Amino acid sequence: MKNLSDRVAIIGMGCTKFGEHWDKSEEDLIVEAAYEAFEDAGVEPAQIEAAWVGTLVSGMSGQALSRPLKLQYIPITRIENMCATGQDALRNAAFAVAAGAYDLVLVVGFEKLKDSGYSGLPGAASSVIGAGNTAPGAFALAANRYFHKYGTGKEELAKISVKNHFNGARNKKAHFQKEITVEQAMKAPMIASPLGLLDCCPTTDGAAAAIITRTELAPKFNKDFVTIKAMGLAVGPGTGRLDPDFDFTSFPETKAAAKQVYDQLGIKDPRKEVSMAEVHDCFSITEMIIYEDLGFSEPGKSKIDIDSGAFGLTGDLPVNTDGGLKSFGHPIGASGLRMLYEIYHQLQGKAGERQVKEMKLGLAHNLGGNPGSFTCSIIALGHE
């Protein structure tokens, strides 16, 4: 993949509070996120030349965006790519901006899941996990195999949940804003052994938005902009569980997408060169495996880094500083942009008590599907 580093800038971002928005419609959430982004970028909706909208189950076309925002008769593209949907919408928009097709573009990701009444993905969307399985059930297979192979136990998973709740308790936009203890996580009701309730992210509503332009144009809109440093996307063949050598303790799609990003940036030691990361912690075991697949920990050795606090706010590589999916929940189309919203503010030095010191490069990672059949997107942000 050709390197587009620093050619596209994010000049404004917005994000709703994630949670149970019984009193708001999809359109309400879109408007709230988009207008925060407009204000942040210092632009008006009428200046937007094209838009991309990411959603898994909410909305059938670009009209999901054009109607609430009154973006009439401009190109609007709907994107769906499993849990990578929000980031893939930004990725496609960034290519269009880099190519010079448009100067000012809006990207919105959203989902309204609570109204469905389902505890997970509603209706046909659950098919991304696989027939006859549930998301907790699929990732419980990974947890059990990881425990068996490396001798790790549930306490490390509990520490991941505790870390993310600690961070989420310091974020006014998180769904859950309450700290938990290791004991609470260990004793939580079982969902799919060994994953308990506090190992799982919640079902949630939310929206997030970004406004992008070419980097040379960015200062005339907002001098406090950040740039897209690299983008990676890897889609697996979906045959993992049919492969006798697939053991659930590593996700090839994450490794492939990470290689694309690291090659673009010349990164040799991500543990030292990445300032912070937002990763797809749909379950605590997922985050644990992602540490290793991204090269933050050696295979089977993430336990050491978890126990040392390496991925906490004051650790050498903070992960999920905003609270992650564990605190925010996972409205599919919005999650990838929500991660970038956190990195955007970290790079601007506006993350408050969650602020990472010496912030230079942030990595956002989304993983969609089930172990053995994933789509993975990774986007890195930094300064020009």
Image (cartoon, grey):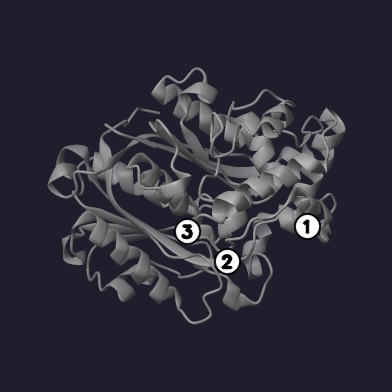
Residue at x-position 61% and y-position 31%? 310
Q: Which residue is mark 1?
A: 133
Left of 372 or right of it: where is 44? left
Q: Which residue is mark 3?
A: 334
What's under tag 3, amino acid-wise?
Ala
Residue at x-position 20% and y-position 49%? 102
Residue at x-position 49% and y-position 17%? 268
What's under tag 1, amino acid-wise?
Asn
Q: Residue furthest bottom?
A: 23
SS at mark 1 in the image: loop
Q: Up-down: is 60 above or below 190? A: below
Q: Which residue is mark 2?
A: 204
Residue at x-position 71% and y-position 33%? 307
What's under tag 2, amino acid-wise?
Thr
Disc 1/disc 3 C-alpha distance (Å) = 24 Å
Disc 3/disc 2 C-alpha distance (Å) = 10 Å
